[in-house]
Amino acid sequence: MVFSSQIFLFIFLPLCLLGAYLVRPDFRKYFLILASLAFFTWTSKEALVIFVVFVLINYSFGLLLGKTRSKDTLVKKISIWLVVLTNVAFLLAFKYLPFMTSSLSGVTGVELPKIDLPVLLGVSFFVFSAISYQYDIYYNKIAPQKNLADFVLYMSFFPKLLQGPITRAGDFATQLAATKLDLDKLSRGVYRFTVGLAKKVIIADQLGAMVDLIFANPANANGVSIAWLGAFGYAMQIFFDFSGYTDMAIGLGQMLGFDLPENFNFPYLALNISDFWRRWHITLSSWFRDYVFYPLEFKRRKQKVFRTESNTLIVFFLTGFWHGAGWQFIAWGLWHGLFSSLEAFLRAKKVKAKAPAAVRYLVTMLIVLIGWVLFRSPDLGYGLKYLGVMFGLVKPLETGLTLGWYLNAKVAFILMLAVLACIPWKQWLPKYFEKMSGSRLNDPLRLIVFLILLGFSIMMVMSSTYSSFIYFKF
């Protein structure tokens, strides 16, 4: 079920909110569990059974790790490795098995049998939630959750289930113990959800139609200007699609009494790649930092040469692989890892950037844009050829397609709107936004903005079929 679909907006969401506010507080978490499982069931009943089994196994694993905390180091290490490898094997099986078998067949020349497993939407997200929970028990950051209902709700809470933000178990448990519903959070949540919906249906989906047309052509069928338009359009589309989902998820959480973590902080204002990843998909970046990068740094602490740089490359290789089963995603991850490692090397040498901020910004955005071409491409070969056209290294075919065929007045307006929405106006012009500093919809200016966004968004939802969020497939 998609947050921007009619069935979610007009049936599921009203019923869920009505139930959450009417049910007795001591039964509310059970109602939210039922609502979350019903939400997940929309993907498939078979997927729900697998998900429930996965959750119960990790609940048992948590209790197991809790019992080994007082044991010797070897027992603890064996236990955590068993738990983590089981979760990783689950992720590999349900997300990467076709990619691994096809790659192995290509290398060996032996046709391997195809195994069709059910599609589990959001598998990368809920597996990472489970792994972080287990690691936090191992590192004595939290106690194992003995209340089964609390753990099931942590794993299945539908606002974050399929696309994040990736939430830590300790933070969620603290909120669950003190959660309460009030009009202030409800109004803030409704406003935040509406902003996210507008990002999705007014900007991302409209740009997506243009981007899909460009990337549906052979890589060398687009002229140079069309190729650049497709790359820039996709950069805007994926940001407003994903950040729109995050706004909707955070808004839903607030409506139900929870504060989910932020996931974006104006990433297209970054002055280097490291800064970009402090602003983009923040919960994933912090997950890899805490559970992969820091342990690698500690384990290899005696290595003095290129330790941080190589660990950074490993993290970005895994980041790319996490996003999708394809060489284009791995190349995208390594592309970002290359520049992040270079920046780590220069920081270690205490080399300060001498280029003006404008130059550093343009270089960073160029690197990001090249990466998005690889990310959007159906395969690595397509992406490399597309980039060749962009930079004049591959001669495009004479197709007769012109820039104006894609860049009509509507697309140009939405691109302009997208660029303006990437600017933190509230931070840059605080005195002009003082009237919107309140958190509730009884602020007149905020109410006007809310009604405009809601009206246009509902019009878009009603006038077209819904488009799935890009990160659903991850």
Image (cartoon, helix red, strand yellow):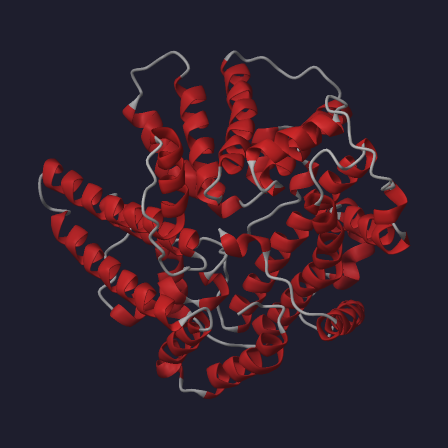
Residue occupying image coordinates x 54% and y 79%: 12
Residue 141 in view in this figure? no
Give the quarter of the image for residue 46: bottom left
Residue at 62% x, 71% y: name it. Answer: 5
Viewer-closest of 354 and 88? 88
| Residue drawn at 45 percent across, 62 percent down | 161
User: Is 230 displayed left or right of 66 in the figure?
Assistant: right
For this rendering, which residue is in front, 66 or 426?
A: 66
Q: Position of residue 213 (x, y in %)?
A: 74, 50
| Residue 69 percent across, percent down from the top left | 15, 47
| 118 or 260: nearer the viewer | 118
Q: Is residue 26 above or below residue 108?
A: below
Q: Nearer the viewer, residue 245 or 260?
A: 245
Q: Quadrant of residue 388?
A: top right
Q: Indicate the position of residue 228 as horizontal and vertical percent values.
A: 77, 35
445 to 226, vertically: above or below: below
> Residue at horizontal 45%, vertical 20%?
309
Left or right for 451, reference 17: right
Where does residue 306 sit, x and y in percent of width and height?
A: 42, 15
Vertical order, 322 against 30 (above or below): above
Q: Can you see residue 173?
A: yes
